[in-house]
């Protein structure tokens, strides 16, 4: 089955690959200067389910695209340590061959490492006890075997380390209630949480099951040190059913902010400029379904309530309010501009030439008391 996955690209796999690549390149540009000054001049890209490197149509998958970018980047070619793994020996052999064919591959200071093995207890132990250089890890199992809280904790525990994993919602939704895969559910949620989920999900409507599963997973990850958790949803061709989620984990707001902007641009629908953080082939054909919630109106009311009687900068408002919401910085700029125009907030600045509706770092925004 995993072999078939690489036979043809799907829209879903292209969106997933773009999100991973865009974040990695943005993350690397942020982390490399610090790694050069304070570290050992290395950053890492880790892919635990790397595949053979190319799809049947000849197009490159994420490992080759990351290496191609590194070859062209003078700083990255000297710093990147690439670690690729797959349990399928045919995949790893093909990947090694494809890597060797990349033009300029010899320019990389550190030769990419390709290993063949299961992501199991030994892998959990390795990442638990190994101090990692700043790393971005991609975990993309075909189902749920090998995806565990211990692996997630291991790859994010050190400074500058973030990860993203592909979460097969359809299979895990079914697996939570299936005693035959209890071991894997316990590894992903903990035994206690998996047991509670199994009981609580009985009889729930699909959308409530999805919310409960995602909340349980998010809470479990946060207990492992993943302060910021950001999901991106993939829907079926009809748009009526969630099939997968791509879930990003970081300890730092900057990483969360970067990934949020990346995922926002890959969303297939917007409502008042607020991204859905969802990719569905059906969204483009049913645009009216995504213009009813009016989320910017809700944001305006929530800001007045949350910050009543307080004075903050735009960035302070954004950082304190945006986590676990669909809003991006552009949405806050738009709403605050309208709120100032309507007299709902007041903005003071040491710069007398400030234009109405602009919120530089020195601008203090005051909210009225309730």
Image: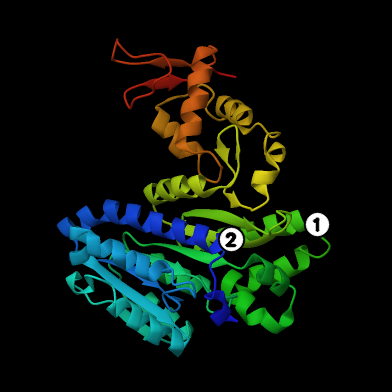
Name the spot of residue 341 as percent of width and height, x first. 51, 13
Q: Which of the two residues, 281 or 271, is positioned nearer the viewer here?
A: 281
- Work out whether 174 lies above or below 26: below
Question: Looking at the rendering, in which quadrant would you find the N terminus?
Answer: bottom right
* Quadrant that contains the C terminus: top right
Q: Position of residue 110 (x, y in %)?
A: 21, 74
Q: Looking at this view, is 32 or 211 the one in front?
A: 32
Determine whether, in the image, residue 39 is placed left or right of residue 60. Answer: left
Per the image, the residue denoted by label 1 is 205
- The residue lying toward the viewer, choosing from 307 and 174, is 174
**Residues at marks 1 and 2 touching, judged by CB atoms closer than 8 Å:** no
> In this rendering, which labeled residue sits more in front, label 1 or label 2?
2
Tell me which corner region of the image, top left, top right, bottom left or bottom right, holds residue 83.
bottom left
Residue at image point 45% right, 88% down: 90
The earlier-in-sequence mark between 1 and 2 is 1
Q: Is residue 315 above or below residue 249?
A: above
Q: Residue at x 27, y 67 (%)?
A: 133
Most extreme residue toward the right is 203
Residue 302 in percent (x, y) is at: 60, 30
Q: Residue at x 69, y 45 (%)?
A: 285
Label 1 residue SS: loop
Report the number of discs: 2
Q: Residues within 10 Å of mark 2 (few under 14, many from 20)?
A: many
Q: In the drawing, what numbered circle is on residue 18?
A: none
Question: Which of the pair 315/7 is nearer the observer?
Answer: 7
| Residue ID for mark 2 | 245
Secondary structure at badge 2 equals: strand
Give the Cα separation between the discs numbered 1 and 2.
Answer: 19 Å
Q: Is residue 337 visible?
A: yes
Q: In the rendered image, which quarter is residue 178 located in? A: bottom right
């Amino acid at each position: 089955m995993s072999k078939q996955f690489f036979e043809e690209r799907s829209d879903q796999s292209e969106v997933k690959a773009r999100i991973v690549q865009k974040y990695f390149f943005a993350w690397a540009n942020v982390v490399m200067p610090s790694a050069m000054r304070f570290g050992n001049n290395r950053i890492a890209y880790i892919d635990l389910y790397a595949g053979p490197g190319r799809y049947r149509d000849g197009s490159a998958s994420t490992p080759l695209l990351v290496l191609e970018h590194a070859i062209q980047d003078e700083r990255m070619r000297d710093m990147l340590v690439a670690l690729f793994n797959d349990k399928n020996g045919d995949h790893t052999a093909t990947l090694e061959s494809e890597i060797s064919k990349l033009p300029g591959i010899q320019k990389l200071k550190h030769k990419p490492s390709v290993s063949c093995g299961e992501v199991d207890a030994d892998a959990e132990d390795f990442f638990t006890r190994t101090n990692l250089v700043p790393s971005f890890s991609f975990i993309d199992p075909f189902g749920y075997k090998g995806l565990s809280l211990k692996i997630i904790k291991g790859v994010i525990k050190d400074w500058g380390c973030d990860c993203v994993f592909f979460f097969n919602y359809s299979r895990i939704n079914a697996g939570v209630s299936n005693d035959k895969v209890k071991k894997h559910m316990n590894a992903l949620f903990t035994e206690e949480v998996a047991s509670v989920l199994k009981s609580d999900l009985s009889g729930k409507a699909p959308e409530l099951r999805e919310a409960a599963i995602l909340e349980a997973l998010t809470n479990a990850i946060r207990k492992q040190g993943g302060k910021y958790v950001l999901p991106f949803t993939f829907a079926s061709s009809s748009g009526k059913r969630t099939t997968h989620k791509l879930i990003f984990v970081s300890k730092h707001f900057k990483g969360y902010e970067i990934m949020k902007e990346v995922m926002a641009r890959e969303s297939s629908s917007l409502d008042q400029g607020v991204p859905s953080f969802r990719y569905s082939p059906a969204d483009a054909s049913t645009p009216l379904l995504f213009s009813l919630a009016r989320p910017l109106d809700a944001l305006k009311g929530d800001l007045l309530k949350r910050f009543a009687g307080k004075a903050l900068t735009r960035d302070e408002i954004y950082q304190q309010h945006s986590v676990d919401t669909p809003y991006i910085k552009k949405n806050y700029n738009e709403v605050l501009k309208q709120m100032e125009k309507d007299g709902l907030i007041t903005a003071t600045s040491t710069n007398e030439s400030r234009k109405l509706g602009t919120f530089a770092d020195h601008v203090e925004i005051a909210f009225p008391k309730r």
